[in-house]
């Protein structure tokens, strides 16, 4: 089973937010070495969505354009990652939540 976490969340001039984090996944039995990510950042009543990809112990992602703005400070970061497996055909998913400082 794989796991991950959010390491940083950075406000970008275009209004998006870049995130990254660590990634632990056993490559044995995977169809591809790449892991896909979906995530939500929650601050009060504001929720924004993002996507990312990762391999080799690290992943990066970015929020989608044209979403409500978040302010610098703490956010609840919810992550969903999935990999395609060869040994047990189908997708394996894992989820997690972190409190991360948006700056």
Image (cartoon, grey):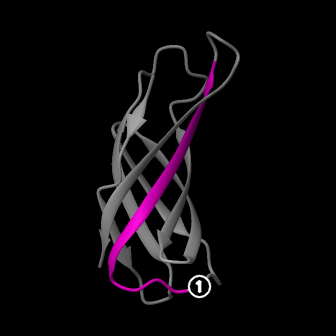
Residue at 33% x, 83% y: name it.
Answer: 72
Residue 103 falls left or right of residue 75: left
Q: Is residue 74 above or below residue 98?
A: below
**Residue density around tag 1, few if under 14, some if 14–19, many if 20 or more, within 10 Å:** few
Residue at 41% x, 21% y: name it.
Answer: 26
Residue 37, horizontal then vertical, whole percent: 55, 48
**Quarter the C terminus occupies:** bottom left
In terms of secondary structure, where does tag 1 sit?
A: loop
Residue 76, horizontal then vertical, whole percent: 42, 63
Residue 7, horizontal then vertical, whole percent: 29, 56
The residue range painted magenta reads 69-85
- Figure quadrant of residue 20: bottom left
Q: Is residue 48 above or below residue 81?
A: below
- Figure quadrant of residue 22: top left
Which residue is at the front of the view, 43 or 33? 43
Q: Is residue 46 above or below residue 4?
A: below
Residue at 49% x, 54% y: name it.
Answer: 78
- Residue 75 part of the magenta segment: yes
- Residue 90 part of the magenta segment: no
- Figure quadrant of residue 65: bottom right
In this rendering, the count of numbered labels is: 1
Which residue is at the front of the view, 94 or 76? 76
């Amino acid at each position: 089973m794989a796991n991950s976490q959010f390491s940083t969340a950075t406000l970008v001039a275009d209004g998006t937010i870049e995130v990254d984090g660590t990634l632990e996944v056993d490559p044995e039995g995977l169809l591809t070495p790449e892991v896909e990510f979906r995530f939500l950042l929650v601050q009060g009543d504001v929720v924004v969505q993002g996507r990312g990809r990762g391999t080799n112990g690290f992943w990066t992602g970015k929020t989608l354009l044209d979403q409500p703005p978040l302010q610098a400070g703490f956010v609840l970061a919810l992550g969903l990652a999935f990999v395609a497996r060869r040994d047990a055909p189908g997708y394996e998913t894992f989820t997690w939540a972190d409190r991360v400082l948006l700056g």
